[in-house]
Image (cartoon, rainbow, N blue to C red):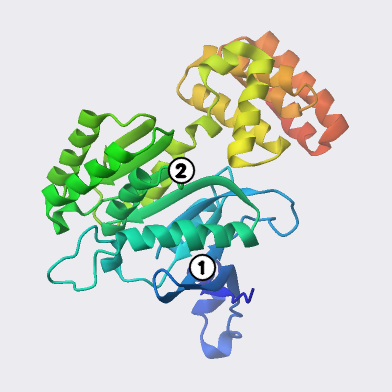
Amino acid sequence: MKAQRLTILAVGLLLLLSPSLFATEDQGQSPEMKDVTIGKSLKLKSTILSMTADLHIYLPQGYEESKESYPVMYTFRHFHIASGILSVHVPQMILVDFSNFNYSLFSLYEKKDEPGSAKADEVLQFLKKELVPYIDSIFRTKPTRILYGASSGGIFAIYALFSEPSLFDAVFAAGPMFSEFEEDRVFNILVTALRKREPRNNSLFFTAGDQPDIVPHIESFKIMLETHQPEGLKWKYNQASGENHMSLVSKTLHEGLQWYLSEYCIIPDHVIIGGKDAFKKHLDGLLQKFGGNEISSSQIFNMTISRHRMEKNFEKALSAAKLYVEFMPDMPLSYFYLAETYADMGQKKLARENYEAAIAQARKTRPGLVDFLETKIKKLEGK
């Protein structure tokens, strides 16, 4: 595998952080500018598409040192946006971007003004028989896969989910451009694929912005889903006010991940009620699907409790925090979050007891937290 570094120049960061950039020639030396490596580049010769596919790959931080396997997101010419968003999301994922294709390949039927279009089925077979197996053979991957497409790529992504439901677990479609095609013809193709679709648990997130030319078509697609109610398909439509066709690209990806990964980030109420055994079963399912390690369980508790506290659902936050302590009794942060929730509820005595429990654990495992936790006690007592 010949890897070629993909780089971007950190111009914006240097402008913000380096006053010396504004010095005249005799006031200082020119700033040193370094490349920032953000991924790898591969080539895959496709027999199905009769072309060589240029692939841009983003690997999660620590991939080379770990033995973990990761879910994979597939995108079309959105490497820089997608890699930036994936770098701050949990769970971590591998990104594969197919960067050198013609958008006419996505057409579900041959358009008169685009000879050689109507290659959607060939692209789908390329993904199924060539690209996905190739990526699985050279990287440590989980069978969990997401496909992201925008504009006409969004329509193709939806078609792929309906036609090959076992290939991708989820699809995010930003502003699918039904308006570029004959709506009835495209919808008939999608309905036919739905009728042949084997029942399977899939997720579909699609969006539109302030786009009067495409919103009516996407609304029609929404009605089609409501009418046919595909078995096992969980879907959500979001019309994002203030967004245009370009800004939807990042917004759809970010919000689609939040929606799809909500089960990873927020512990369901029934799991919290079920207690330690229920959470262990829930966590095992998530780790099998998304990957991760023991740190993930702490992150899940932290995010769940923080969400409930932010929304002032203190009873739910309290239940989650108590389960956190039960599940991870040696973790200083479990007592910290329980203390914070008690403080939110005005129960200072219980808050102090759990801050002190957090300090006791921190002295054993994370002494750097002790001063911070002692400060929280002083603040609680008004000192």
Residue position marked by numbered label 1 in the rendering: 56
Residue position marked by numbered label 2 in the rendering: 166
Viewer-nearest of discs 1 and 2: 2
Is residue 108 visible from the viewing direction of this image? yes
Q: From the viewer's perspective, is 141 left or right of 43?
A: right
Residue 258 locus on image (x, y percent): 45, 39
Reply above or below: 33 against 328: below
Res 138 → quadrant:
bottom right
Reply above or below: 215 against 98: above
Q: Amino acid at mark 1?
A: His
Residue 345 locus on image (x, y percent): 56, 12
Structural crowding at the residue carrying mark 2, measured as other residues with C-alpha within 10 Å and reported as few (<14), some (14–19) or many (≥20): many
Residue 296 locus on image (x, y percent): 66, 36
Looking at the image, which is closer to me, 339 or 44?
44
* Circle 1 SS class: strand
**Quadrant assignment for the C terminus:** top right
Measuring 60% from the left and 70% from the top, which residue is drawn there? Answer: 37
Is residue 18 visible from the viewing direction of this image? no
Checking the image for residue 220, the label placed there is: none
Looking at the image, which is closer to me, 58 or 44?
44
Structural crowding at the residue carrying mark 1, measured as other residues with C-alpha within 10 Å and reported as few (<14), some (14–19) or many (≥20): many
N-term mark: 1 or 2: 1
Q: Amino acid at mark 2?
A: Ser
Res 218 → quadrant:
top left
Give the alpha-carbon distance from disc 1 to disc 2, as whole Å. 24 Å
Residue 246 locus on image (x, y percent): 28, 58
* Circle 2 SS class: loop
Measuring 45% from the left and 23% from the top, which residue is drawn there? Answer: 311
Looking at the image, which is closer to me, 302 or 342?
302
Q: From the viewer's perspective, is 38 left or right of 188?
A: right
Measuring 24% from the left and 31% from the top, which residue is drawn there? Answer: 228
Contact, mark 1 vs mark 2 (Cβ under 8 Å): no
